[in-house]
Amino acid sequence: MRHKIIFRYTFLSLLMLLLLQSCVSKKEMLYLQDLESFNNTEVTFTNHTLQVDDILKISVGALMPEAALPYNNVTGGRVVANSVDIMKLDGYLVSKNYTINFPVLGELSVKDKTTQDLENDIKKLLVDGGYLINPNVTVRLLNAKVTILGEVQRPGTFSFTENNISLLQALGLAGDLTINGSREDVVVLRRIDGLQTTARINLTSANFLSGPYHMVKPNDVIVVNPNSAKVKTAGYVGNISAILGITSVILTSILLFTR
């Protein structure tokens, strides 16, 4: 009878230990806990600075459409022309030297420029060179994407067509964080002019809403690290045989000393 009581208390103690190790507090789970302090604040949108391997769709229009034809890559077929994948094949790829080859105008530098900057540059070159009168130029990034890894419902790489999407919107594309994801430790990897930058974001606070990582930039990589409960669970419960072995040793020792 005494052995049964000892066994029961030992089992319950181990069970409670495992439960405590796997608990996640409410404070660790809730997003933007100080959001009230950021209410009615201005949202800042920033244009993406063009980077190596960006694919651009550049359209040139004029009062006489025929005059603008030499400056446009035209794919035959209306249905085909509406395909983003086909447009990527016809797009302008930014080289490792931050240049594109544009019809008639030749090699153009895009370094440190946004799509708006490039629009203005091409328009000025066409006007100053006497090629077109009052042309209309639009530049669009075709291959904007973000990669989301770690403790999310659907990790992967996601394309987006908007000029700006927020960090929370990007995480929404991946189905939100899992219960095991750390809201306090989200890593953002970002390439800026050939340099790799990193930042750690705490989603439980709204402070990041006023920082440079509020908005996602094309080619960002977001990594959601596991929370402390997941790490502890992986260390203890992940190795069931070790748990059983330790439990067996403890029970055997108790039985030997209580005889």
Image (cartoon, grey):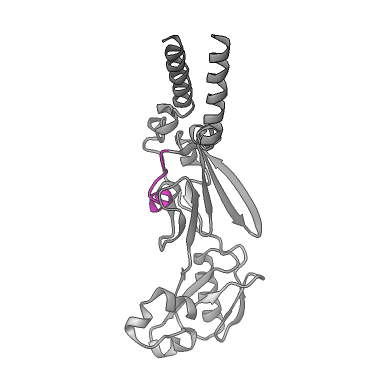
Where in the figure is residue 195, as x and y percent of width and height?
Answer: 66, 56
Where in the figure is residue 163, as x and y percent of width and height?
Answer: 44, 60
Q: Is residue 191 above or below residue 89?
A: above
Quadrant assignment for the C terminus: top right
Depth check, front residue: 172 or 249: 249
Quadrant assignment for the N terminus: top left
103 vs 67, left or right, is right
Seen as rendered, the residue at the extreme bottom is: 66
- Magenta stretch, residue numbers: 169-179
Residue shown at 44% from the left, 56% from the top? 164
Q: Is residue 136 visible?
A: no
Q: Is residue 88 above or below residue 235?
A: below
Q: Is residue 138 above or below residue 212?
A: below
Residue shown at 53% from the left, 76% from the top? 92
Depth check, front residue: 17 or 83: 17
Residue shown at 44% from the left, 26% from the top? 19
